[in-house]
Image (tube, helix red, strand yellow):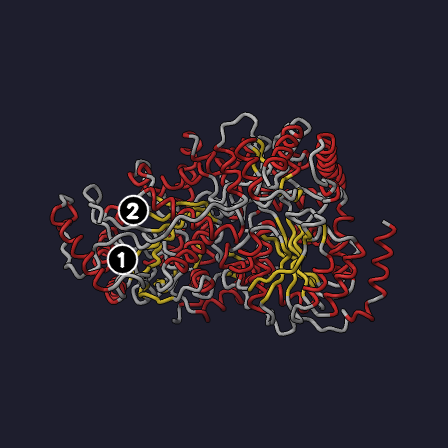
């Protein structure tokens, strides 16, 4: 080591000579980036010292004590995994077992497409990674296409397709006056889009509004998509979490499949299995036959390899352990229903509280909407007041994460909302 | 047109049909319309005119099957081979003497700690990853007493192993750096070009490997970097160059550093084997520390895949050493904008294992011992293979096997010889003649020796 320290000494000595210090930074012109609107909320919440603070910002489930939850089925799966398996690289397409089980959830346990092997599917980095991989694939293989994104949508959707360099258009979705679905506007946009356009659809529990089309409306949308030859890409981040029943939550997808659409699907286990930080998800693209599915899958892998080579194994092992064991799977279904039920209960409680306070506004939408989020209809200014005066944290679009609402804070929350909206 | 009597009407319209004419599309629509009339599908009741887009193949019908990844494809082929004497010297994953994958004891301990800690949750990490992991990783590569760290000039973000770190770094450079060209050594890891190209950079090469000596082409390296435009990015393998195993000496590194700084080139280190090359974490980090010590800026991609055996967990870190703390903070905020639309935030499990080990003095020491044992086994395999080839009298100078360092040996065998060895001896390696020493054992050295001998004497 004497040699190396001698060289290091010389190098430090040479500083002034070789001029490294005199060159200014290459990054002087780098602007500070804006904070992520969603994740930035939690950062602000954590920094707040107030004992009354409430975090209804990011969509991560909390129990009635406001604590994060690790599902029992997950704990058990981890106990089985730890110490038993090696950590070798997964194939580029990820865990085959996990992908198989995941497709069953979206396409149906006995789906003919699974039997025919006509689905190209790869493990992805949760929902984000699945969407990004699809966007990159869309750019490469449908380079003239655009993506139609609902208004509003999860903010990161715009970032994903932008970074994939796919041009974006929007379509009407949320109807502010009714705090429901702008079905007429949606159908108009579907009809007016050029034939063969790509559409991003939320399969259930629309984020951020919680407003989903009814089954009849989904059938109409599917029909119109057929007429127009549109491509439907479903982002399904809340299967099981919306109604408590995964089969019911997949209804929109099943309708499209029945109608013969070749869809794409992004699935995530972040919320419904509580595996947030593990980044487990799946991207699937329904093809015409096995041969095409093999080709498409190989191309998806070609996109994944220069991004992260192969996906992380741990989360995938948890998923396949749970879904591959009938008892664990039953336990999971019970726990998912439990989470969904608690949220539905909180919706009812929040609405009742607001009505009891004599709010002049209608809060029906709180119980009409579904899933983790409630689009309250509050303005950014009202949200700012909630934060400043009541230490309540949510995104400025008025989106409330119902998962952050508990029997302990629902009264406080209702009060605060009433205060900032009563003169609206 | 394939008749579609079994499936309901298939819809979709190839929107990227720059190659198919309008007439073709109308014709196709017409043909499918005729098929609809013959089909007994219940979906027939949906009427649509021949010129609507209701019929159609998948929008991705034109997608052709991609070639196998040259490196990962080797394992695919190996798995298919039924031969009992098959040997996988392809992908760089460590194997024990028994040919088994290895999970380090210290990793198992860390895992147990994590599992037993019921207070642990699985929440999202921040976009930049696990903070403690980031700090410890920066210390690991730069040294605990690094002035750059003490002065808060280093921003470190957790990424998906080495690949992810390189990709995020590349995307950042493509967006914020004034030079869009990166120089990579010839040869280099097969995935480097794709990673940087997709990140938005253009890739050029600099001479590195000298086939004649099976060592470093130092003159060529200096010339090529010397004629690079000022400010260009230079990819450097921190140690244990992949695929050649040929590293510059420390004196040569110092010359490289001077050249790079004098031309204001931007160094980007790929550190995938720290501790794995010589067995010492500090020794293997010297080249990086040389650069960080001179006050200049650089990027560093770290991987824990090999040195902690965490391959599939995808644990790594990207560090950017900046001039000032203020710059570092702004750079970090921009890195987040690259990461968020890629995967939002990194996976928690592997990083937690690493942090558990690095923060605990006993676990850390245990790790260094296990790491050295892996490195030593590889060094001993090198010696054994070299001795065996010499004893066999195999033509050629095989001293490069013991001169090269790290997981790989660039044998110097050509593609035909490699194909021969696969076909006749069931030995799997990448077609550039790179073998993973980690895949060898005392038991399999004779078989490999036979194969090399046969290849060299029968195939030219």
**Which chain does the residue under circle 2 lie in?**
A
**Residue B153 in the figure: left or right of residue A322:** right
| Tag 2 residue | A288
| Residue lying at 38% horizontally and 44% vertically, measured from the top left | A294
Tell me if I can see residue A345 in this picture: no
- Tell me the quarter of the picture where residue B447 sits: top right
Q: Is residue A371 visible?
A: yes
Residue at 38% of width from left, 57% of height from top? A141
Please check whether the numbered discs 2 and 1 fall on a single chain: no
Residue B372 percent location from the top left of the image: 75, 38
Task: Tell me the quarter of the image containing the C terminus of chain B.
Answer: top right
Secondary structure of the residue carrying tag 2 is loop
Q: Which mark is residue A98?
A: none
Per the image, label 1 sits on a secondary structure element best described as loop
Residue A26, image x, y percentages:
66, 71
Q: Is residue A410 above or below residue B371?
A: below
Q: Is residue A379 above or below residue A240?
A: below
């Amino acid at each position: 080591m004497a040699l190396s320290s001698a060289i290091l000494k010389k190098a430090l000595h040479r500083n002034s000579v070789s001029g490294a210090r005199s060159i200014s930074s290459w990054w002087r012109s780098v602007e500070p980036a804006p904070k992520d609107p969603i994740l930035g909320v939690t950062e602000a919440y954590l920094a707040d010292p107030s004992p009354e603070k409430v975090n209804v910002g990011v969509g991560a489930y909390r129990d009635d004590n406001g604590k994060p939850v690790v599902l029992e089925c997950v704990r058990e799966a981890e106990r089985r995994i730890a110490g038993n398996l090696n950590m070798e690289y997964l194939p580029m397409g990820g865990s085959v077992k996990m992908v198989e089980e995941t497709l069953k959830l979206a396409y149906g346990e006995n789906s003919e497409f699974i039997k025919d092997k006509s689905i190209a599917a790869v493990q992805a980095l949760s929902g984000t990674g699945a969407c990004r991989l699809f966007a990159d694939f869309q750019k490469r293989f449908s380079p003239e296409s655009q993506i139609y994104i609902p208004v509003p949508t999860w903010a990161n959707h715009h970032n994903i397709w932008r970074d994939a360099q796919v041009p974006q258009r929007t379509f009407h979705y949320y109807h502010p006056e009714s705090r429901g679905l702008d079905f007429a506007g949606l159908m108009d946009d579907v009809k007016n889009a050029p034939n063969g356009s790509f559409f991003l659809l939320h399969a259930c529990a629309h984020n951020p509004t919680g407003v989903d089309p009814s089954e009849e409306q989904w059938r109409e949308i599917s029909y119109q998509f057929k007429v127009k030859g549109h491509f439907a890409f479903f982002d399904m981040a809340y299967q099981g979490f919306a109604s408590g029943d995964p089969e019911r939550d997949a209804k929109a997808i099943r309708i499209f499949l029945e109608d013969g659409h070749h869809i794409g699907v992004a699935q995530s286990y972040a919320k419904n299995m509580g595996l947030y930080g593990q980044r487990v998800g799946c991207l699937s693209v329904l093809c015409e036959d096995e041969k095409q599915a093999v080709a498409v899958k190989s191309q998806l892998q070609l996109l994944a390899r220069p991004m992260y080579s192969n996906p992380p194994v741990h989360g995938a092992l948890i998923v396949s352990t749970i879904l591959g064991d009938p008892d664990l799977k039953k336990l999971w279904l019970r726990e998912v229903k439990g989470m969904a039920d608690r949220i539905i209960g909180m919706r009812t409680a929040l609405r009742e509280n607001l009505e009891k306070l004599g709010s002049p506004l209608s809060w029906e939408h709180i119980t009409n909407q579904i899933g983790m989020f409630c689009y309250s209809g509050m303005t950014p200014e009202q949200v700012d007041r909630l934060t400043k005066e009541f230490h309540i944290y949510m995104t400025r679009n008025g989106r409330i994460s119902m998962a952050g609402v508990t029997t302990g804070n629902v009264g406080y929350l209702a009060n605060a909302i009433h205060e900032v909206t009563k003169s609206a | 047109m394939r008749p579609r009597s079994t499936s309901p009407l298939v819809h979709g319209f190839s929107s990227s049909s720059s190659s198919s004419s309008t007439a073709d599309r109308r014709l196709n629509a017409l043909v499918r319309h005729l098929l609809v009339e013959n089909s007994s599908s219940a979906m027939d009741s949906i009427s649509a005119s021949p010129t609507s887009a209701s019929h159609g193949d998948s929008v991705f019908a034109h997608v052709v099957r991609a070639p196998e990844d040259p490196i990962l494809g080797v394992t695919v082929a190996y798995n298919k081979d039924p031969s009992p004497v098959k040997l996988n010297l392809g992908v760089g994953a460590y194997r024990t003497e028994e040919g088994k994958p290895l999970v380090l004891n210290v990793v198992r301990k860390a895992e147990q700690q994590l599992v037993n800690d019921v207070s642990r949750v699985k929440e999202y990490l921040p976009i930049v990853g696990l903070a403690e992991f980031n700090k410890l990783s920066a210390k690991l590569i730069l040294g605990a007493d690094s002035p750059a760290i003490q002065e808060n000039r280093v921003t470190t973000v957790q990424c998906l192993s080495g690949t992810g770190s390189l990709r995020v770094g590349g995307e950042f450079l493509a967006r914020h750096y004034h030079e869009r060209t990166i120089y990579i050594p010839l040869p280099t890891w097969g995935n480097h070009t794709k990673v940087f190209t997709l990140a938005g950079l253009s890739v050029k090469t600099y001479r590195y490997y000298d086939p004649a000596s099976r060592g470093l082409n130092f003159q060529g390296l200096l010339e090529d970097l010397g004629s690079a435009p000022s400010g260009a990015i230079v990819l450097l393998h921190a140690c244990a160059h992949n695929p050649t195993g040929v590293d510059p000496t420390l004196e040569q590194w110092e010359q490289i550093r001077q050249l790079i700084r004098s031309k204001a080139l931007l160094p980007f280190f790929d550190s995938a084997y720290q501790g794995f090359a010589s067995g010492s974490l500090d020794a293997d980090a010297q080249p990086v520390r040389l650069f960080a010590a001179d006050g200049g800026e650089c990027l560093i991609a770290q991987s824990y895949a090999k040195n902690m055996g965490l391959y599939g967990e995808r644990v790594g870190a990207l560090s950017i050493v900046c001039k000032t703390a203020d710059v570092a903070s702004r750079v970090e905020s921009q890195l987040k904008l690259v990461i968020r639309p890629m995967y939002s935030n990194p996976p928690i499990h592997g990083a937690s294992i690493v942090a558990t080990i690095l923060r605990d003095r006993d676990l850390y020491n245990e790790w260094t011992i296990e790491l050295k044992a892996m490195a030593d086994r590889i060094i001993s395999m090198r010696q054994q293979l070299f001795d065996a080839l010499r004893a066999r009298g195999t033509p050629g100078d095989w001293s490069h096997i013991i001169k090269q360092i790290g997981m790989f040996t660039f044998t110097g065998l050509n593609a035909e010889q490699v194909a021969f060895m696969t076909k006749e001896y069931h030995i799997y390696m990448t077609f550039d003649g790179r073998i993973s020493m980690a895949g060898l054992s005392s038991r399999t050295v004779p078989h490999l020796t036979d194969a090399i001998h046969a290849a060299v004497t029968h195939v030219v």
